[in-house]
Image: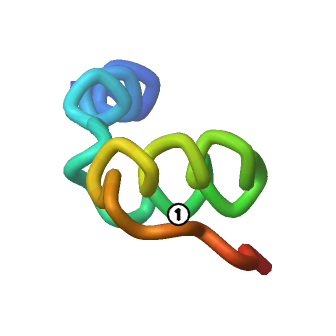
Amino acid sequence: MDLRTEIAMKWKQATIKNHLVFSWVFNDHLELLEQLLKMWLPNFKVRQLN
């Protein structure tokens, strides 16, 4: 298997369950993190994300 194929296969397997992908997405898009926290914890107020 060549490197390009291997990388493509690993990328397809990357999901939100993968902590690295989760970190990339939610560190760059705090508004998405806020929405996710509101869905997970609807009775709590999100005060600050940084």
Q: Which residue is drawn at 57% across and 52% down?
A: 33
Q: Nearer the viewer, residue 19 or 5?
A: 19
Which residue position holds label 1?
23
Give residue 16's position: percent from left, percent from top: 31, 43
Q: Which of 44 and 36 is in front in this view?
A: 44
Give residue 7's position: percent from left, percent from top: 39, 33
Mark count: 1
Please determine whether, in this image, residue 41 is positioned above or below residue 8.
Answer: below
Q: Residue at x 43, y 56 (%)?
A: 37
Quadrant holding the N terminus: top left
- What is the three-letter code of the residue carrying label 1? Ser
User: Badge 1: how crowded within 10 Å, few (<14), some, or many (20+)?
Assistant: few
Quadrant holding the C terminus: bottom right
Q: Is 43 left or right of 34, judged from the image as shown?
A: left
Q: Nearer the viewer, residue 25 or 40?
A: 40
Q: Nearer the viewer, residue 6 or 35?
A: 35
Q: Is 7 left or right of 50, judged from the image as shown?
A: left
Q: Which residue is drawn at 45% across and 24% down?
A: 4
Q: Residue at x 54, y 68 (%)?
A: 45
